[in-house]
Image: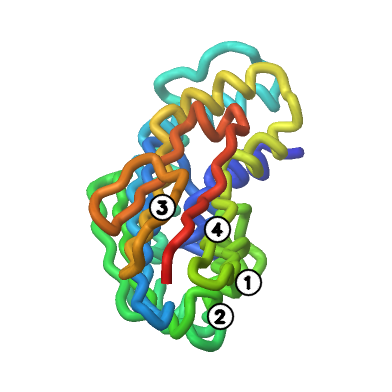
Amino acid sequence: MSPQRFARSLIRVVSVVALAAFTGLTGCFQMEYAVELEEDLSGEVAFDLMVDLDRMAYGVAAVQKSFMGDDGSPTDEEVEASRQELLDQVDSGVLEEDNLRAEIDPDLPPGVTLLETTQRRDGLRTEVSMRLAFDHLTSLNAVDFGADGGGGPDAEPFAGIELVDEGDTFVLRNEPMNPLEEVEDEAGGMDGMDGLIEMMFQDLSVAFVIAAPFEIVEHNASSREGDRLRWVYDYEALAAGLDNRIFVRYRK
């Protein structure tokens, strides 16, 4: 595997927003999915993502040296060259709002509508927000931001949504994606990669929020505020493969 391919796999975790045109970004990385449900199980979902690539520049330079057989740390000049390569990718225009809409709209499944996208940039720090409407919660199962071939395990964030009718109650559950899985698979156990991945992902945070107009009977969320449940997974939890299932039982 070439250093370019490995670097692309390291970057791919942001493909949930940038899609096939971006094969990804890492660094200081925070993502939140917030679902607002109505009584008929229609609603809206908001995606908010922040990624800061400054730390990624060091990682890309280190990977390139490793593939050339050099075990030493990258020089300041090599890190700066990698940083410029990342800036060139960001400056390609893929994160402009019109481009995002053009990439996302055609691949949305029936019952799901893109309401808005926004993005803000400051150097290598990028924030992207997206809001979708859905006619039924299970419609989100078919959302695939990697439909054109550029997605990783984060490209189908709701593929595992299940609703189980129990009569007076129903269960909502989902298996969230783990953006570390593909990067670790691509690393293939190469010497030194575990430490490098940890360095680049140590600020990783993935959060899911669900708000619904039903009585909450039980749940496994990280926290609760009224009818709003929040699940948060950090680098340590995802790297350790801890149970990250979403589970909530509602009374109808």
| Residue found 65% across the figure and 44% down from its top | 182
Quadrant in which the C terminus is drawn: bottom left
Residue of label 4: 173
SS at mark 1 in the image: loop
Which sits in the foreground, 13 or 57? 13
Which sits in the foreground, 80 or 127? 127
Q: What is the distance, in whole Å, between disc 3 and disc 1 at their CAs?
A: 22 Å
Q: Count residues near mark 4 (Cα–Cα under 10 Å), then give few for <14, some for 14-19, many for 20+.
A: some
* Residue 119, image x, y percentages: 28, 62
Q: Label 2 is placed on what type of residue?
A: Asp
Q: For residue 236, which numbered disc appears in the image?
A: none
Q: For residue 107, which numbered disc appears in the image?
A: 2
Q: Label 3 is placed on what type of residue?
A: Phe
| Residue found 28% across the figure and 58% down from its top | 227
Q: Label 1 is placed on what type of residue?
A: Ala
Q: Are marks 1 and 2 in contact (CB under 8 Å)?
A: yes
